[in-house]
Amino acid sequence: MTARRPAHVLANAPFRRLWLAMSVCSLGDWLNIVALTALAGNLARPGDFRAQSLAVGGVFVAKMLPAILLGPLAGAFADRFDRRLCMVVADLSRFALVISIAAVVWLAPNDVAYRWIIAATLLVECVNLFWVPAKDATVPNLVPKERLEQANQLNLLVTYGTAPLAAALFAALSVVVDLLGGRPWLSGCLALVVNAGAFLVSAALIFTLKGIPRRNGAISTPSVVKQIVEGWRFVGGNRLVRGLVIGMLGAFAAGGAVIGVARIYVTALRGGDAAYGVMFGAVFVGMAAGMFFGLRLLRGLSRRRLFGLAITVAGLVLIAIALIHDLVFVVMLTVLLGACAGIAWIIGYTLIGLEVEDAIRGRTFAFLQSTARVVLLFVVAVANPVAALFGSHMVRAGAFSYTFDGSNLVLVIGGVLAAVVGVLGLWHMDDRKGVPLTADLLAAVRGESFTPEPPEEVPGLFIAFEGGEGSGKTTQSRMIAIWLRDQGYDVVQTREPGATKAGMRLRAILLDAAEKGLSARAEALMYAADRAEHVEKVIRPALHRGSVVVSDRYVDSSLAYQGAGRALDPEDVSKVNAWATGGLVPHLTVLIDTPPEVGLRRLGGAADRIESEPLEFHERVRKEFRALAAASPDRYLVVDGTLAQEEITRLIQDRIREILPDPVPREAEDITGTMPAIRE
Ligand code: TMP
């Protein structure tokens, strides 16, 4: 049987075309930022540190101000126009404006050229405010609902993924111009021509794009200020989320500080435009690496600790960047800084996703993005004037001289702030109080972690079902067992606790409502004892026979109920269970995620000892289940338990199909006479 995979969103031709247009535009946008800031630095009086800082700062402000002031207004306008036409006209206008900048820089005196850079940039950004909402509104028209998330991920990929590409392109252009002995501003002009060309390509792609409906209801973009004020109301009340948000913004600001002063710092280090391009790219390469590897890094270390640590290290690296005046070191440290910021961002995002209720998660992320934009604007806007105000100072001691200028000062301030935020985060959000950080870190480096062992090599397949009370997992595990049997698999359907003789007696004690005073540790050990018996007598033999084992609950239930619910140390619960099961981990765990108030309402009859726990207990259990799933997404399927029963079954079947081995046909079994991988 071959796994049936749904078509990738890029198989959809109209979306592919739009995505291509987006990629080209993103590349153009980034090229635009690098080229304009480089040009601003070149046009200012050479050697005048203050003038250069202010010139570069002005470009950043012009780039970001329109979105913050006029964003929602333009969004509402964009809804009134034909979207395709709106995007094409916007692309052509951007093309004309950007080309005009290149022409003016080429022909006009420096001060006129700079003024036009600022004016045209403001105009380009205003035009962007029409293009972006029209594009955002078009995506759902081209892509089916279940593929939207994939489409959004692809959008995010090109939005940030093109930054290092643009930086590399700019650096290459600068090297070529240098080699040919061109004027210093020539590389900026050439980059702008490429940038303008990108908008032209995008216009052509979108013009020939069929299938964009003229209008499809209004999309309303709430104002940035409103998003922030409202968002803080949700976020401010939760201590953990508050800490995470502050930490993430700190990490963002650290990256912003480097971008903000990179142009003048590179000049001070005697680097040219090429070096600036490399440094700009280094931040993004680092960030991408951090985001990609961040969640996999040091798996044994608590995520909250890694979060605080990443921000603290980012701060220290920033200080080092400020003080070590060597271009090569600075670029290497910038990659490291980007990586720390990326790690902090991705961990923060994931933890907030787990912490915040479904209903307000969208608003929380919108809040985060709006605040990040404002913080970035603030940092780049303030960084350059502060640098200019401080000026450049040289310390001499005999033959030794050391220059400390405004850009260094900004980086040191940013670094100290980030380090303080990081240490405060480590302190306030620590979930491993009492365990020294260094000991934890060393253990994580040595690989002593909760990381599940790689799945044991057995011919069979082990699927566990998990979920809170009344989540429907028992029904679903039965349906799935029936479905698998219908397809010719040998299925062992089982449950915890109580699948063995000894287990049944343990179950009676564990769930007896009269057993009031049972201690948390005794409870955890009894569940583990039931599990040890279950694995040895039922699960492992079945897997070695080649059967598909479908178990209603497994180790995660103990981590969630005893670890989070009864507040036992998760590491202890994990260790006891690893010992009890001999490290046997399911190939797939299906988590049916149901809000406890819904699940508990579904239960009939008298509540058992665990069902009668208060709602907060069940909420902790749910949160832990979700955290476990988020930590190893490859081994989990999380299904919304409030969906219709048939829909849930279908989603589970789709996922199981991907990992099922082929059932061995009866004839083959007869001919070979050997034990098949999965038997009838
Ligand atoms: P169930 O038959 O409804 O799944 O009942 C099992 C109960 O035992 C349920 O309330 C969850 C609880 N439980 C634990 O607390 N820890 C465990 O390890 C397992 C397997 C179940």
Image: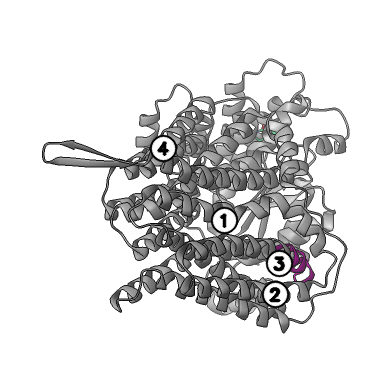
Q: Is mark 4 within 8 Å of ligand 1?
A: no
Quadrant where the N terminus is found in the figure: bottom right
Amino acid found under the numbered disc labelled 1: Asp
Q: Which residue is mark 2?
A: 15
Who is closer to the viewer here, 633 or 102?
102
Question: Of the residues under marks 1 and 3, which one precedes in the sequence?
Answer: 3
Quadrant where the C terminus is found in the figure: bottom right
Amino acid found under the numbered disc labelled 3: Trp
Q: For mark 2, does the 10 Å Cα neighbourhood hold few (<14), some (14 to 19), or many (20 or more) residues? A: many
Q: Which residue is mark 1?
A: 634
Question: Of the residues under marks 4 and 2, which one precedes in the sequence?
Answer: 2
- Residue 178: image quadrant is bottom left
Ligand 1 falls in quadrant: top right
Asked if the residues shown at circle 1 and circle 3 are in contact, with their CB atoms under 8 angstroms apart, the answer is no
Q: CA distance from mark 4 to mark 2?
A: 42 Å
User: What span is colored magenta in the figure?
Assistant: 132-144
Depth-wise, is mark 1 or mark 4 nearer the camera?
Answer: 4
| Residue 541: percent from left, percent from top | 55, 52
Q: For mark 1, does the 10 Å Cα neighbourhood hold few (<14), some (14 to 19), or many (20 or more) residues? A: few
Asked if the residues shown at circle 1 and circle 4 are in contact, with their CB atoms under 8 angstroms apart, the answer is no
Relative horizontal placement of residue 472, taking residue 367 as reference (left or right): right
Q: CA distance from mark 3 to mark 4?
A: 36 Å
